[in-house]
Image (spheres, grey):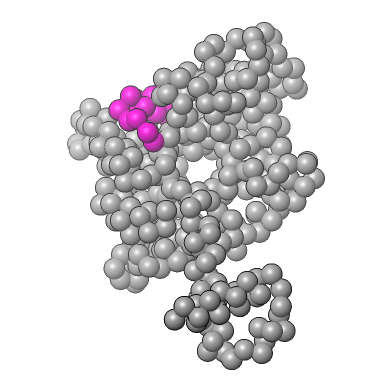
Amino acid sequence: MYLHVRRLFIIFVIDTWGGGNFIEDLDSSFLSEVEQIKRFIMMFLLSHDMQFGLQHPNFSFDYNGHDTSQMVDSLKNLVAKAENAGFDSFWVMDHFHQIPIVGKKEEPMLESWTTLSVLAGITSKIKLGTLMTGIIYRHPSVLAKIGATFDVLSKGRLFMGIGAAWNQEESLAYGIPFPSAKERLLRLEETIQIIRKMWTDEPAATFNGKYYQISNAYCNPKPIQRPSPPIMVGGSGERHTLKIVAKYADACNLFGSTETVKRKLNILNEHCKTVGRDYDSILKTKLGIIVIDDEEETAKKRVQQVTKGMPEEQIREFAIYGTSEDVLNQIEVLEEVGIQYLIVDLEPSRELEELEQFADNIIKKIS
């Protein structure tokens, strides 16, 4: 047995780092074993990197009737279970109206930073963040101050998610100007620079940009995390957003199937080469809906309900579903193409049950 495994490992090494002619001479049945052990070794080498976050985008199931005082207890229970189950982070959306893929715009939506501040006081380990803070909703200097304060009061647990914002309907409803996509992306670049400067420059920060200016702005106390809390940029626009990631971000956050993610990461890598950034210094994260069921067909029906009847080809861009083994295999493939951190949305009507199932069948097996 030892010699057989040793032979498989030697062939794996030759196949991975060269020696194609030698591999071609082997019989197909033995090659299948080579492929299996090759996949096992690759997953063993990669598995220590994968971490998980939980996003809570739907507050409609956090209370009964009209008693919204139940919401804080529901959230406390959820985030405590996530922390104990091995999730590295907990996220809420930065929206004022509910978004279409989740529910109707009039459904409950708590303000993100206020919510996170409450959750920081009832947790001790789990990182907390917004997915994503829309940069048009708050002036960059104020956002930097909010983030620094949060990091101090949470004892260094801020994971800053930020993006150019996309929801024109809610912005106009709240009387917030909604510039063009080009301008919002330019504002995003300036916002990240201001936040970094306010978190690191001593004794005060100054910045003169096209859209934002600050002069001798003090941010005291500074964040606990040094040199600063991580900044994750959301979005996967290939020409502009991923270039912003390459220039300024600690992490990216992508949607998409394995094929889509692989293409986006290749583009990010090219942007990194262009701007002189170490591609490996960027944490690669993905957001995805997770539906697990003992029966694959039942899981498919449930994910169709969650995604509001979205066509199958689109569902594959947003969701990972099937039996526990199916979901685990899909996550492993994502890890193989470069994803290091998966943030999951679970079915809102059965979130606690799904959290425990995901922790037992996925986190404990892959971490």
Residue located 64% across and 28% down the image = 192
List the single residue furthest toward the front: 3
Residue 186, quarter of the rendered image: top right
Q: Report how many numbered discs are placed on residues in the image.
A: 0
Residue at 30 percent of width and 42 percent of height:
84
> Which contiguous range is marked in magenta?
111-126
**Image vertical order of residue 299 relative to residue 154, above or below:** below
The x and y percentages for residue 65 are 19, 36
Q: Residue at x 59, y 60 (%)?
A: 337
Q: Quadrant of the N terminus?
A: bottom left
Q: Is residue 13 above or below residue 82?
A: below
Residue 206 versus residue 68 in the image, above or below: above
Residue situated in front as seen by the camera: 51 or 244: 51
**Residue 214 placement, left or right of 49:** right
Question: In the rendered view, does 25 fall on the left or right side of 62?
Answer: right
Tell which of 226 and 300 is nearer to you: 226
Residue 177 appears in the picture as rendered: no
Q: Name which residue lies at 37% across and 33% down.
A: 125
Question: Is 120 within the magenta?
Answer: yes
Asked whether residue 360 appears in the rendered view, the answer is yes
Q: Is residue 77 magenta?
A: no
Q: Nearer the viewer, residue 32 or 249?
A: 32
Where is residue 279 shown, x and y percent of the image? 68, 47
Residue 321: image location, x then y, percent: 40, 63
Farthest residue, direction right? 274
In the image: residue 68, left or right of residue 267? left
- Image quarter for residue 177? top right
The relative height of residue 217 versus residue 185 in the rendered view (above or below) is: above
Residue 86, percent from left and from top? 36, 45
